[in-house]
């Protein structure tokens, strides 16, 4: 019996992610670690994708037959089913993945070395910056009080922004290239190693801003940010290991506009 911590590599999915299934499955099967299992939870409305997943060797699949129509809530429900499975089967860690994130084979070994409650690798995505989509790190650090005061001189903040703790910034290029493990506000949550001490106490959720101390009650977080911020409220800090850089299969999500700029296919021009 292995003395290594028992790790569950898991992700929620649906039929819209079929385009990257082979790449994802091949990468997680090749992880260089001797004590991990793979779980995929399918929340597609139809059963055909689950039938396809069930034929894959070395992977355990569960069907999330939710009647929930809200895509964000469906992801929340599936991620919480992953937590339930990990608790029932006594896993020490969950490596919570997104299906379009392709990890290097050393991801578990290297993240375990950090010995943190919450630590991710790093990947990139397109973000709207100055009116254009740019490729930026999917990890955010806090704005310092000094940075906040400088920005406040140039920008009129809405009433819900009261201090530097209400803002975040993408990791800088220098931080990305540092090859260090950095404390962050929000890590790359699609390749996040979660210790049992965390998932015993924290569930995935869609927090509204009022729950986070703001006056606005209309805007909600995504599932990953809700989880991380709730964990922080319970005393768990987040880290990003910038040595572990994952590939993010985002090409299928974007197309070029008339000017040659990449825009998300779901965004109106």
Image (spheres, rainbow, N blue to C red):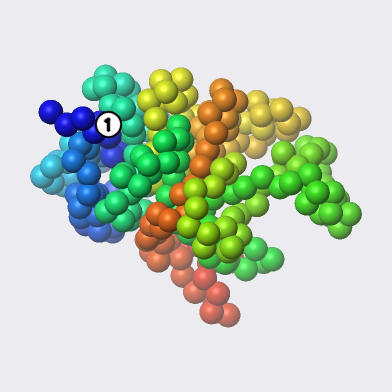
Along the line of sight, the residue nearer the viewer: 170 or 195: 195
The local crowd at label 1, few if under 14, some if 14 to 19, many if 20 or more residues have their Cα within 10 Å, is few
Q: At 69% from the left edge and 66% from the top edge, which residue is drawn?
A: 130
Q: Position of residue 74 (x, y in %)?
A: 41, 35
Residue positioned most to the bottom: 259
Using the rendered view, name the quadrant where residue 9 is placed.
top left
Instruction: Examine the rendered structure and indicate whether residue 265 appears above or below residue 36.
Output: below
Q: Position of residue 231 (x, y in %)?
A: 53, 28
Count of all numbered marks drawn on residues in the image: 1
Which SS class for mark 1?
loop
Instruction: Examine the rendered structure and indicate whether residue 93 appears above or below residue 240.
Output: above
Question: In the image, is 247 to the left or to the right of 72?
Answer: left
Check the picture and name the quadrant holding the C terminus. bottom right
Residue positioned most to the right: 153
Residue located beneath label 1 in the image: 5
Check the picture and name the quadrant holding the N terminus. top left
Question: In the image, is 151 to the left or to the right of 170?
Answer: right
Q: At 72% from the left edge and 40% from the top edge, which residue is drawn?
A: 166
Q: Position of residue 11 (x, y in %)?
A: 32, 41
Q: Position of residue 202 (x, y in %)?
A: 47, 24
Q: At 28% from the left edge and 58% from the top edge, which residue is drawn?
A: 19
Along the line of sight, the residue nearer the viewer: 255 or 200: 200
Along the line of sight, the residue nearer the viewer: 188 or 179: 179
Instruction: Examine the rendered structure and indicate whether residue 155 appears above or below residue 225.
Output: below
Question: In the image, is 127 to the left or to the right of 192?
Answer: right
Along the line of sight, the residue nearer the viewer: 104 or 43: 104
Q: At 66% from the left edge and 29% from the top edge, which residue is drawn?
A: 212
Whether residue 88 is visible to the viewer of this picture, yes or no, is yes
Whether residue 42 is visible to the viewer of this picture, yes or no, is no
Question: In the image, is 34 to the left or to the right of 264?
Answer: left
């Amino acid at each position: 019996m292995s003395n290594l911590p028992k790790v569950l590599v898991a992700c929620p999915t649906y039929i819209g992610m079929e385009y990257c299934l082979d790449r994802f499955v091949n990468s997680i099967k090749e992880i260089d670690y001797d004590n991990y299992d793979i779980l995929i939870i399918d929340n597609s409305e139809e059963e055909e994708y689950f039938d396809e997943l069930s034929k894959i060797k070395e992977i355990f699949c569960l069907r999330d037959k939710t009647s929930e129509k809200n895509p964000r809530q469906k992801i929340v429900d599936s991620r919480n089913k992953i937590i339930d499975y990990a608790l029932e089967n006594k896993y020490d860690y969950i490596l919570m993945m997104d299906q379009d994130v392709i990890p290097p084979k050393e991801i578990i070994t290297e993240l375990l070395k950090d010995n943190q409650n919450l630590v991710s690798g790093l990947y990139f995505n397109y973000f709207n910056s100055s009116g254009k989509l740019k490729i930026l790190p999917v990890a955010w650090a806090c704005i310092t009080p000094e940075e906040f005061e400088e920005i406040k001189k140039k920008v009129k903040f809405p009433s819900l922004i009261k201090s530097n703790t209400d803002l975040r910034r993408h990791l800088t290029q220098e931080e990305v290239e540092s090859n260090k493990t950095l404390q962050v506000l929000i890590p790359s949550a699609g390749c996040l190693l979660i210790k049992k001490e965390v998932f015993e106490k924290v569930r995935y959720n869609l927090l509204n801003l009022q729950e986070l101390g703001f006056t606005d009650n209309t805007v909600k977080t995504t599932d990953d940010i809700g989880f991380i911020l709730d964990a922080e409220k319970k005393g768990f800090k987040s880290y990003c290991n910038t040595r572990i850089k994952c590939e993010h299969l985002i090409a299928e999500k974007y197309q070029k506009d008339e000017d040659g700029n990449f825009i998300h296919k779901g965004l109106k021009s």
